[in-house]
Image (tube, rainbow, N blue to C red):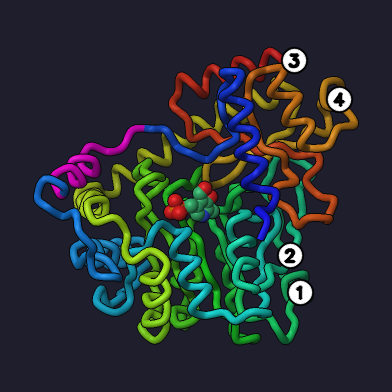
Amino acid sequence: MAPRVVQSEIRAMTAECDRIGGVNLAQGVCDTEVPAAVMEGAMQAMRDGHNIYTRMDGIARLRRAIAGKVAETHGLDPDPEHEVLVASGATGAFHAAAMALLNPGDEVLVFEPFYGYHANTLRSMGAKAVAVAMQEPEGEQEWLLDLGAVRAAITPRTRAMMLNTPSNPAGKVFTRAEVEGLAEIAVEFDLFIFTDEIYEHFIYGGAEHVSPAMLKGMQERTILMSGFSKTFSVTGWRVGYVVADAKWMGAINYFHDLLYVCAPAPFQHGCAAGVEKLGKTFYARLAVEHEEKRGMLADALRVAGMRPHVPDGAYYILASTDKLGGLLDGKTAAEKARSLLAKTGVAAVAGTAFFAVGSGRGEDLLRFCFAKKDEDLMEACRRLEALS
Ligand code: PLP
């Protein structure tokens, strides 16, 4: 199956950015420091000989650490023996869970703008991602979910919804009322809710992270997925997890084993050390640091003449270019991203990469990532501001 727009667009921008020596705000690769406890934990594990396959659902130490973590953050009490899977990233988690729980032809609701991997993973197994459009606000606020539109998108083939909160690319943190509304719909139509909570610790300005798994009676139908790529800045380590009811875990484990065998052994130890040793202060500092970066980038985008939708979570800003004129006038989003790169040396992603093909949406939008070292982000901001 041919790769769809989003990855090719991000890769193309990255390649062009490298060629001209620009600052890459296109790719969501956080290049911030790996916490020492995490790094040391992995290196020590290699020295200690943890270099072979692990149990297919991960080492007991990490399964226990994840169970303890979700007890603290979500108020859950999963059995680390039967209800926690250490996966090959949140990406592997979703692939295995979708293979286990969906059949070809099944429909899964995704909230648009959506993360391309979710839609493509579904497509790769013959399931269908059905986009429910969120509304772009007039001002700088977050995108709006219409529960009526969610209901209207349901057909007899709908089996699940994918809730990515905080979301990529919009940075939307779904409110408690929205998550409760979605949970009600899931119960009414007997749907699974797959959650991708990879940005759960990137929450700003008093917003609250709410997972459907936290709501009464929702644990059995929620397939909670998250990981360490973003929190510990280890995107290349491929360690994530699934927390779900034991009745689904056998099949999810089976497909995860088939696809990945296990997550990398020493990196599982590194992540376990991180979860064991880094407490609330670490996660709180991570949010504060990224909130500062968010402020820096949003200011630069305003000075440059764009209208940033300031996100409550994750580490991307979708910015509207509708007022920019001049340089980007009359161009498609992909052309705008290229013109901006040529003119400023800052790479962003065309908004169209996050909308259903043929929807015609996203042409006015560019996505900028702010999970960058301060010096690189400052350089990008300086270049963007020079546009004014
Ligand atoms: N989910 C979302 C929403 C993402 O934005 C990303 C990375 O950009 C991932 C998952 C990838 O997570 P992992 O590295 O754990 O596979």
The answer to which of marks 2 and 1 sits earlier in the sequence is: 2
Magenta stretch: includes residue 239: no
| Main secondary structure found in the magenta portion | helix
Asked if 205 appears above or below 217 in the picture, the reply is: above
Query: Badge 3 local density, few (<14 within 10 Å), some, or many (20+)?
Result: few
Residue type highlighted by circle 3: Ser
Residue type highlighted by circle 2: Val
Residue annotated with mark 4 = 325
The answer to which of marks 3 and 4 sits earlier in the sequence is: 4
Residue interval drawn in magenta: 33-45
> SS of the residue at dot 4?
loop
User: Within 8 Å: ligand 1 and the Cβ of disc 3?
Assistant: no
Classify residue 99 as left or right of residue 26: left
Query: Badge 1 local density, few (<14 within 10 Å), some, or many (20+)?
Result: some
Q: CB of mark 4 within 8 Å of CB of mark 1?
A: no
Quadrant of residue 55 within the rendered picture: bottom left
Residue annotated with mark 1 = 153
Figure quadrant of the N terminus: bottom right
> SS of the residue at dot 3?
loop
CA–CA distance in space, label 3 to label 1: 42 Å
Residue annotated with mark 3 = 388
> SS of the residue at dot 2?
strand
Residue annotated with mark 2 = 132
- Residue 8 versus residue 240: which sits nearer the camera? 8
The answer to which of marks 4 and 2 sits earlier in the sequence is: 2
Residue 23 in percent (x, y) is at 56, 23
CA–CA distance in space, label 4 to label 1: 36 Å
Q: CB of mark 3 within 8 Å of CB of mark 2?
A: no
